[in-house]
């Protein structure tokens, strides 16, 4: 058995056995397989796919690369949620505090950005001092005390996913349904929760591009969950426009706090829906009862206080969150109604500003990003500010070349 032969088989659209998958992926974990060979295999998988047996096998290999959290050490009802990723998606950081304020416990493992989609861990690391690498003892203590803990994959929990995740991010191999399913479900199962909600995003601003793919993916993660005796539900949402008004790591933390303080809108309603689904699953109550609990946690300020507890527990200093003081306004050239905001074009613009990684060694500028000043359906006049760019010092942007907005119906 050798890596070249395994890559060759997948290049030729042949099935890989458990032993072959274990040989090359565990070899990569042990640094016996180089980046260039794993990159070649990931590209072959992205182009030719993984069958259901390969996905099940690879999920098992990922889980067994590390430990599985033993949540029996503490009392509580455990729920977990994951999004397949999208532009401006910061739902986890709103939902975690809401469900914790309602008495549930949400142990969460998240990833960094993939391609042009932001990562929850990158957002959290924009908070000075925030520790995403807790020991198991610290993780469980924080979960018992606060009810919500969010960490990165590490050397103990799904270490293989951490390595593959970083490589996929910079090798244009982020959109494989099989690899997305393996990555998400290995983390969910290793995280120990029995109640799992997967928020499946599709559209031009997501890793999954079509509703048909989203439905296929939904069935796939449910099958993986069933194999490991987990209750899995999915929600399918489109991601053709950015989720929320802020795109960029620190800016998204600002929007999370605004929502938890009472800001209304589509993103708030989505987070309440997802929170209610988790509360209903965990407490075995009706969706309407759960929705009322979630709304009360938000309205009373308890969810915002939970967010502050969560940040403080993981050594973050929210008072030192930094947003760039340098801004550029993008103004409308025509009048009419705002018909479209392309999530993909917004993501490309955010990448130019420095929000995402282009190589494994790239440094993110946490302070930069975009704030949308107009929403779909808003009337727009000439020179209205469509969005504000938060940029690095002295950065020049040709705003006339920005094609993120579609305005129709003007005179």
Image: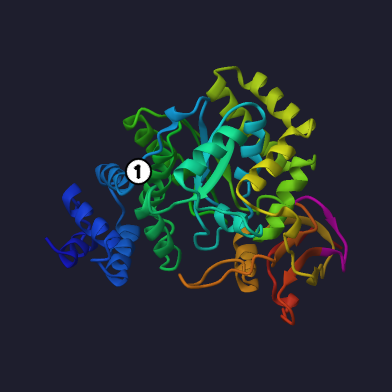
Residue 36: percent from left, percent from top: 30, 72
Relative to the observer, which residue lies in front, 205 or 339?
205
Observer able to see residue 381: yes
- Residue 346 among magenta residues: no
Residue 20 is left or right of residue 46, and the answer is left
Observer able to see residue 340: no
Residue 137 is left or right of residue 148, and the answer is left
Q: Quadrant of the N terminus?
A: bottom left
Relative to the observer, which residue lies in front, 63 or 263?
63
Q: Main secondary structure of the magenta part?
A: loop
Residue 180: percent from left, percent from top: 41, 50
**Image height of 106 relative to 33, above or below:** above
**Image height of 277 relative to 51, above or below:** above
Q: Quadrant of the C terminus?
A: bottom right
The magenta region covers 376-385
User: Which residue position is annotated with label 1?
Assistant: 67
Q: Based on the displayed image, in which of its 4 quarters is residue 250 positioned?
A: bottom right
Residue drawn at (63%, 32%), measured in percent from left and top? 100
**Image height of 302 relative to 133, above or below:** above
Residue 204 is left or right of residue 62, and the answer is right
Residue drawn at (71%, 63%), measured in percent from left and top? 370
SS at badge 1: loop
Residue drawn at (43%, 62%), measured in percent from left and top? 166
Q: Based on the displayed image, in which of its 4 quarters is residue 68 positioned?
A: top left
Residue 349: percent from left, percent from top: 64, 69
Residue drawn at (59%, 26%), measured in percent from left and top? 279
């Amino acid at each position: 058995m050798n890596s070249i032969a395994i890559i060759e088989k997948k290049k030729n659209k042949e099935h890989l056995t458990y032993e072959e998958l274990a040989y090359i992926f565990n070899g990569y974990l042990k640094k016996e397989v180089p980046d260039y060979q794993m990159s070649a295999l990931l590209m072959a998988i992205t182009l030719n796919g993984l069958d259901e047996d390969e996905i099940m096998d690879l999920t098992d290999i990922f889980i067994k690369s590390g430990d599985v959290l033993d949540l029996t050490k503490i009392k509580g009802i455990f729920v977990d949620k994951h999004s397949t990723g999208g532009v401006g998606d910061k739902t986890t950081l709103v939902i975690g505090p809401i469900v914790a304020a309602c008495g549930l416990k949400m142990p969460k493992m998240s990833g960094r950005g993939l391609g042009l989609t932001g990562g929850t861990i990158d957002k959290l690391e924009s908070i000075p001092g925030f520790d995403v690498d807790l020991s198991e003892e610290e993780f469980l203590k924080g979960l018992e005390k606060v009810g919500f803990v969010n960490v990165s994959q590490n050397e103990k929990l799904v270490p293989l996913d951490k390595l593959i995740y970083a490589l996929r991010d910079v090798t244009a191999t982020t959109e494989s349904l099989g690899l997305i399913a393996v990555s998400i479900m290995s983390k969910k199962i290793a995280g120990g929760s029995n109640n799992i909600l997967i928020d499946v995003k599709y559209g031009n601003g997501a890793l999954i591009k079509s509703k048909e793919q989203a439905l296929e993916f939904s069935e796939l993660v449910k099958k993986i969950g069933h194999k490991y005796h987990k209750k899995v539900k999915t929600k399918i949402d489109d991601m053709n426009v950015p989720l929320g008004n802020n795109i960029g790591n620190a800016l998204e933390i600002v929007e999370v706090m605004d929502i938890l303080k009472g800001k209304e809108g589509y993103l708030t309603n989505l987070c309440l829906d997802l929170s209610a689904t988790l509360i209903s699953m965990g407490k075995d109550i009706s969706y309407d009862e759960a929705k009322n609990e979630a709304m009360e946690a938000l309205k009373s300020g308890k969810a915002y206080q939970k967010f502050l507890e969560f940040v403080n527990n993981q050594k973050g200093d929210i008072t030192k969150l930094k947003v760039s003081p340098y801004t550029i306004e993008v103004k409308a050239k025509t009048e009419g109604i705002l018909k479209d905001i392309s999530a993909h074009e917004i993501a490309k613009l955010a990448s130019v500003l420095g929000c995402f990684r282009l190589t494994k060694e790239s440094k993110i500028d946490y302070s930069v990003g975009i704030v949308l000043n107009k929403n779909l359906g808003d009337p727009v006049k000439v020179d209205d500010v469509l969005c504000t760019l938060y940029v690095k010092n002295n950065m020049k942007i040709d705003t006339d070349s920005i094609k993120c907005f579609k305005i129709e119906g003007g005179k």
